[in-house]
Amino acid sequence: MIEVVDLVKHFRAVDGSTVRAVDGVSFAVAPGEMVGLLGVNGAGKTTTMRVLATLVRPGSGTARIAGCDVRDEPIAARRRLGYLSAGTGIPDRLTPRELLHSCGRLHGLDADATRRRTERLVEDLSLGGYADRPCGRLSSGQRQRVSLGRAMVHDPPVLVLDEPTSALDVMGARDLFDLLADLRAGGRAILVSTHRLHEIEHRCDRFLIVHGGRIVDQGTRDALVGDRPGGLERAFFAALEPEGAT
Amino acid sequence: MIGTAGRRRAVQALASRDLLEFVRDRRTLFVTLVMPMAMYPVLALASTLGVRGAVADLEARRAPRRLALAVTGPGAEAFADRLRDVVAAAARPPGPGWPAAVTVEASTAAAGPGRLDAGEVDAWIEVEADAVARLDGPGTLAVDVRLPAARPTGRRQRDDLAAVLGALADDARRRRMTEAGLPESVLAPLAVSFVGGSAEDSAAGLQGVLPTAVGGVLVLLALLTATGAFYPAIDAIAGEKERGTIETLLISPCAAGDIVAGKFLAVFCVTLATLAANAVSIGATAAVLVRLAPAGMTPGITPATAAACGLVTLAAFTGLAAVAAALCLAVTSAARSTKEAQNTLTPVILLVSGLAGAALLPGFGGAATAAVPFAGQVALAKGMLEDAPGWPWLLAVSLASSAVVTWIFLRVTAAALADEELLFRGPDSAAGPFLRPAPRSRPSPGQGLAATLLALAALWYVQALAPGDLLLALPLNQAALLLPLVALAAWQRVNAIDTFSLRMPGTGAARASACLAAAVLLGASLFVVGAAAFVAVRGTHLSAAARELAERLLELVRNGPLWWTCVLVALLPACGEEIFFRGWVLSACAGDRPTRGRAVAAVSVQAAAFAAFHLLPERLPQTFVLGLVLGWMTRRSGSILPAIVAHAAHNAVPLLLAGLADDRMALGGAAPASIVAVAVGCLGAGAALFAAGTQRRGATNRCDD
């Protein structure tokens, strides 16, 4: 579902130097799989996800969403993708129901399909209590749920979620990952990044650890942790600071 | 892929979504509905009160006054009696030039000054004993009319006094004629009476003030209509970026053009609503004003004419609303936050209102003005009120121009929306104005615009300081053009070779020589053909500014060596202006790897800037075409040298004609048909030679680009 091969994205800094945000990353996420993308700030997680979301053009390499190349077929790729980032907002002056409806129409759904899908999401995401309240008056957790609904309004087979729990409390994060587990069970490919390793340690099928624009380690939780004490967090630090490094 | 129906659905969905947000925004509602509804009544009330006060004051000033005269001296009684008889016999109605009533009294000389200063009488006349006899006799009676020293005497009072004493003089003339046995007709050798026509309505009209007042209202309408797009446009793009919702649109399966189309529809609807609210407010306020106007004051146009003017104005301003919506979107598309967008858009709105105001200046009008957004709509509406002919054609030009300009702005918006640098600005690229940017091979479009604005500003201010002597003024102009550019280029650290195309044209010496020879042909023949076209279209009449410039150049040619004049007038501007326009501005607009469309747009934009730089409106088409040709030469050859040579040849032709042949050509005189025919031939030959000389090199350059 998600295929990334030798992806490169460089930026030019103010001083003229080149920032290698993504430097030859390759990975894949299969249907029914949830993969965690881990890394410190500036490691290249967000840029990789923005490339997948067609918000940033890749410098070289390929990235495909459900078979559609993000460079050559960006619109087809967007139809198959649900994207949510920590910085993604929702319009303050619309209600969740209005927002979901307009997003459905934007994705080309007809009026009936949009209405059905909206009501389904209101029910699945438990938005009923505030579905007709302006989004500007919702709490952070409620807004994040609405935002997730917005990403899923066209029922995409692929979900790319960049720090989806950053604004959520513990309960909200747990509910969100429960929902993602259901979506994974439904056959969706999910790529999720977060700094809260404990939230996803036992929820993702595999993990990719990126640093300096490259994947420095990857595998299942058990493969990464091995018999090391300290769980995934310890494995994460070990990947970033290999033996011999300080 | 989503089909046409899906795209339309998406555009409608986006427009509906944005409209829903706009109507829930208090700022938008205030600007769209409340401001127009409040603005015109407040302005009208204030102006009505002012007009009524002014009319009342005018009527008070024009009201007839009483005139009291005191006559003193030995002959006072007889003189006063004669004056009373004359006033009674005159029987003229009170009004301008004749007082409401005249009282004449004989007084003692001692009491005169006191009564005058106390305001009991308006004037005091002292006469001799034989005053009346001398009045009737053949001589001239000199009288001093003493006016009060302690209080000012109004002009009306002096006019009334002159009229009464004039009537006394007329009476004396008649008496002298009778005494001499001559008929009174001797004093009236000519009797004039007007036949036909109709007398002007004596009631005060608004015809005189109406065009000025309507012009002001039209500029205000243009400003308020553009302001209607202000907040929606900021909210539509910069607001979305600030709230983080722009990503949700960019990851929808819509092209950037469709997203911009949806947003434009929403902003355009709000702008149209603003226009409609303004129109309703203006119409209602005008109706109220007519009722409140002082009695006898009429608007001077029939309701049918007013309705026709209103409809044409609304049609033209619909185009203005579209341009305003697209312009606001284009300007705000580069902003990251609403504050940044407001800071950028506010001066733009002020500039376009200045453009609208320029349409009120005398001499503006016609198809050229109609094609200019904001100025064209105001000029068209004002022309309708003044019953100017050809309004359907001007309306068509205005609407077509609005459509084209709107489309250009929307393309700019779509390009900015898809620009990831503008969207995310990269990890380290947040730059302030005093943070030196990274080196670039060529300047950015913004830097091209900045350099052009700086050059125009510098040129403007240099005009105030420039000496009359062209020997000093010309180098000063070039310095004003290039010095800001040098500073900007050094600051940006551009690649000078790429930016200014500092290469030889063609591959090999033979091709380079062919290119330069072709450039001479093109430049020289362009001048002759351009001058002939100018004379054919406009005749040999030059504006005062153009004639003054031509005469100063001729003076330079006559008084100095020709080669030096050519260096100063032909070569120096050619080098400076080519480095600026075909170097910096063209590179900035075209970018590193321009598509064919962008290259054409870049050549057109720099040609327009080049034409504007010359500040001679009647030469705009000629200068624009020259800019297009020079831009094409630079793009095709990858070198600035041919443009410099062609520009120098173009400038040198009138100097050579003036120095070696005939002054008439240099002053815009008609060239013989044979010379024009030769020039057209040279133009074609030059273009063909240039194309041949740059064929291989041009292809290479395009790859290099």
Image (cartoon, rainbow, N blue to C red):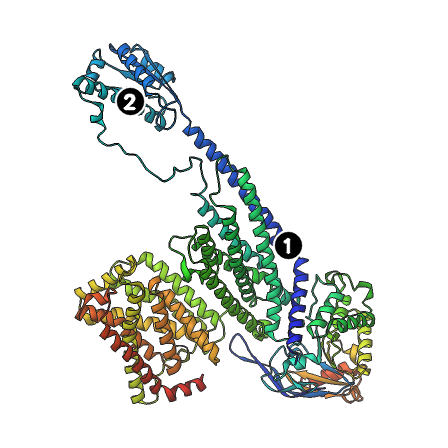
Location of the N terminus of chain B (image quadrant): bottom right
In the image, taking residue B429 as reference, residue B448 lies left or right, namely left
Count all numbered tags in the image, as a single digit. 2
Q: Position of residue B4 (x, y in %)?
A: 64, 76
Image location (x, y in percent) of residue A199: 79, 77
Q: Earlier along the polypeptide chain: callout 2 or callout 1? A: 1
Q: Which residue is mark 2?
A: B167
**In the depicted structure, whether residue B194 falls above or below residue A81:** above
Can you say whether B330 is above or below B280 in the image? Answer: below
Q: Quadrant of the C terminus of chain B?
A: bottom left
Occupied quadrant, residue A45: bottom right
Q: Amino acid at mark 2?
A: Ala
Residue that carries the numbered disc 1 in the rendered image: B29
Determine the CA span between mark 2 and mark 1: 68 Å
Location of residue B694 in the rendering, given as x and y in whole percent from the top left corner: 36, 86
Mark 2: give few (<14), some (14-19) or many (20+) Cα within 10 Å: some
Callout 2: SS: helix
| In this picture, residue B130 sits left or right of residue B56 | left
Quarter of the image where one finds residue B700: bottom left
Q: Position of residue B308 (x, y in %)?
A: 51, 52
Q: Residues within 10 Å of mark 1 (few under 14, many from 20)?
A: some
**Residue A243 is at least partly visible in this image:** no
- Residue B267 seen anywhere in this rendered image of the structure: yes
Residue B195, placed above or below residue B344:
above
Q: Residue at x 37, y 23 (%)?
A: B99
Quadrant in the picture for residue B648: bottom left
Look at label 1 and name its amino acid.
Leu
Circle number at residue B529: none
Q: Label 1's element?
A: helix
